[in-house]
Amino acid sequence: MSFRDDALVLIEELERYESVSRAATARVVGLAPMSDIEEELSLERHLERGDLVGDEYRSFLRKYLDATTRLHDPRSLAHQVAVPHYSGALAAFLGAYTNNPMAIFEMGPAAVTIECFLVNWLLKKVGWDPSAYRGNQELAETHGGGVLTHGGSLANLTALIAARSKILPNAWEDGTPNNLVILAPNDCHYSISRAAGILGIGSKAIVPLDVEADGTILPERLGSTLEAVKGAGQSVLCVVANAGTTAVGQFDRLRPIGTWCRENGLWLHVDGAHGTSALLSPKHRELLDGIELADSLVWDAHKLMRTPGLCTAVLVRDCRTLDAAFHQDASYLFHEKSQPGVDLIHRTVECTKSGLGLKLFGALAAMGENGIAEYVERQFALAKWAYSFLTEQSDFECALVPQCNIVCFRVQGGDDLQLRIRDVLIAQGSYHLSTATFNGRRYLRMVLTNPATDIDHIKELVGCIRTTSVELQAPR
């Protein structure tokens, strides 16, 4: 067998997998015990024999794909993960096979070039000045900057390190003082708390901001929170706002928040991992009105840009803050050298960093900017339709009007019933939903990322939930 033979086998099995998934004729999710999956895949035997080629490879692929959660199935509605465009997936394969780690220019010149191009493209969408390069030199200091990372958690951490480098330039050598706090709403992503722990600030140093009933920040109450913090002898590292909360997808009012942060000399970080892609839509970019006032921003391409995971941009309004975030000393990498491109290692936690931009560029270049915008608008519109349909049902209610492609809803009954319904649907393999708690109540949660999901699927889902609810509550 050859590379070409096995590559063709892979393509054939993926085509079969996609066809079956889109037709919704197999289980959308099947949670078999790990021991059963290990046995079915013959993991130990393949390792002993070294025989994963030809017919054995095809058999393994078929069994592996049958054990996956089928994101390509239109009934897959659980999580904020893209159904990748095949061009992005092929780009990921290209990057994996060429295997050019590209935090250092000489290790991946094409990958570095694509990443810098895409970072500039994203910066312009935000309203920040892009970088201009001549060889390995940036032509000006005061412009935006950024880097692509493996996910929003790493990007949020990187942004908070950049914020620390701005207010505490010597923190890398001297450490972080114990009076730093982060001002953030309770609904911020858990990675903010993780970042606080990693930075040595501690999750207890996250001061909750006052919010509206929908969980968004009350800009007019920011001043009183700041006064209380200062009165306690604490210093603010940053203010965190959301552009699409993880649980329900709500957007903070960024313009008044950004204006207040500017007036008070505070760093504003926007976790826009899910919702920043609304910037690509003329219909929805107003959801991020004022985003240009932020100091840093996280933007996931693997959520609403049809890009394989992971691919997240961490962007800053002033590149110097990100350039000062990390300090490095490795004689085999950092020395005087002549090269026609830039090293990105000083902007990222990672050294052996894969060419993430290739995946994003593959999806973008195949669909075009307008194609991505149309996709975003379709998914947002489907969520609005789902909300309207659900609220018309006498036995259903929604948490709130969706602002993006996330819909939280529940059938009549208690919190435990919502969880039991989800478990039944997963056990059946019929629909894959997640759940979320909002204002103290448990809701079923659907994330409409699949371009194949339509109105009929949602109607069928409602019928399945209604039937399951009745069965679960029937006298025994």
Image (cartoon, rainbow, N blue to C red):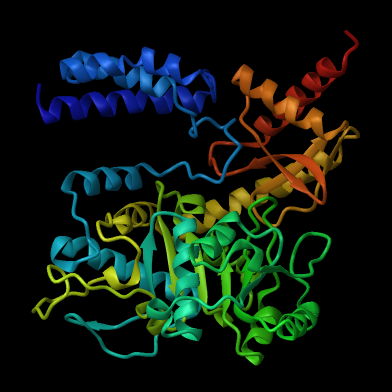
For residue 190, what is the image quadrant?
A: bottom right
Q: Is residue 222 left or right of residue 75?
A: right
Q: Position of residue 241 (x, y in %)?
A: 64, 69
Find residue 470 and report its horizontal and vertical position in percent.
85, 19
The number of callouts visible is 0
Q: Is residue 365 left or right of residue 276?
A: left
Q: Quadrant of the N terminus?
A: top left
Q: Is residue 128 above or below residue 459?
A: below
Residue at image position (32%, 56%) is: 356
- Location of residue 444 (image quadrant): top right
- Residue at 66% of width from left, 86% of height from top? 259
Residue found farthest to the top: 476
Q: Is residue 288 above or below residue 235?
A: above
Q: Quadrant of residue 312?
A: bottom left
In the image, residue 203 sits, relative to residue 91, either above or below, namely: below
Q: Position of residue 165 (x, y in %)?
A: 44, 80
The C terminus sits in image quarter = top right
The residue nearer to you, when weighing 117 against 381, is: 117
Which residue does the image show at 62% across and 43% down from the upper left? 447
Q: Name the one closer to the observer, 93 or 381.
A: 93
